[in-house]
Image: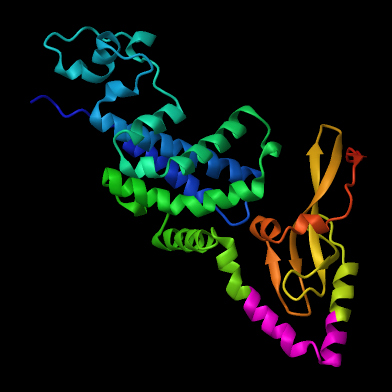
Amino acid sequence: MGEELHNPFIEDGIYCLRRASKALQDKMDRDLFYDAAIYYAFGVEKLCKAIVHEINPVFLLEKDGFENGVLPFYRHRLIERPPIKLDKDNKPNLVAFKPSLTRAASFSQAVKDNMDRFTELADIRGTLAHRSWMELDRERAGEFLMRTFAPTVELFAAELEFDVDECYESEDHWERLKEMSDHLLAQENYGEFVKEILAKHLAIWEARKDDAAALEKSAGATAALLRKMSIGRPYPTEGICPCCKQPAVLFYQFSEIFGRDEVAITGSYAVGVGCYYCDIHLMGYRAVDHFKLNDQVGGPFQGTMTIDEPAGD
């Protein structure tokens, strides 16, 4: 038996996932989002390549065949080793992300069962690489990264037999991201997830609806919040509570496209709702979709604002 063929993709994959885990947070700015998404995708691609490499590294080549595979992967097995040539023929092109997924799925049931997840990750990376990040629904994409990262690490750790904690800075860091992932996974069937929440707050409303003092207090708190405006945060407007059907505060944001010298406001969209009559507070795209909160947002607003240059000294 010759030398064991080293699999270089496992260490690379672990490195990339560790980099991604450092950036992953509930609320990510542009820098953190790019780091989390790109390194997460790099890590998955590397580990899919590792799975294929374990079977036969030649299967990773864009163009297979003896000439393409023998020098980069099996030089150590040749009876007469040719001189090392530092040209492109010794480094043939490997398949890209999505073909790596497809080939890994041929040998891994775990990868095959999660192809939808990895395809979505590949699409996020593709948008960041080839288009503007403004085209992403960043809330959905950010939640996707948080929801799927910890289970993905566990999947590949079991498949390739490395320790999960190699992909995290500390055990506390691992546990925090796993806890957040579990919480988000529990909301995937949002209709079932929210049933208990609605029942709890409907009971609060039933206990208050005949209490004049409580109703007056709720009305005052609602009016006060509607008057409160904070630049850069969700804006309040009048809405209807999806739980108790009383007046509520609907929160919305503007859809913006930034240019070099101006920002165009192309519309607005709901981000959540709060109600002082039953104390319910629902935020995020799942609540917006489930309760059709965008139907309560006012007519489309459009406009353009000039970005002023800071005054010189």
Q: Main secondary structure of the magenta part?
A: helix
Location of the N terminus by quadrant is: top left
Give residue 263's position: percent from left, percent from top: 85, 39
Q: Is residue 209 magenta?
A: yes
Asked if residue 296 lies left or right of residue 109, the reply is right
Q: Quadrant of residue 207?
A: bottom right
Q: Residue 232: x, y in percent? A: 80, 54
Point 29% across, 49% down: residue:
158
- Decide: is 280 above or below 151: below
Q: Point out the stretch of residues depicted in magenta.
A: 198-218
Q: Is residue 65 above or below residue 267?
A: above
User: Quarter holding the C terminus?
Assistant: top right
Q: Residue at x 35, y 19 (%)?
A: 61
Residue 74 on image: x %, y %: 21, 18
Q: Can residue 163 be seen by looking at this rendering? A: yes
Residue 269: x percent and y percent? 78, 51
Q: Quadrant of residue 210?
A: bottom right
- For residue 51, side relative to residue 114 (left or right): left
| Residue 168 visible in this rendered orientation of the protein | no
The residue drawn where x is 58% and y is 52% is 143
Tell me if residue 144 comes above or below residue 34 in the rendering. below
Residue at the image position 72 percent from the left and 73 percent from the top: 243
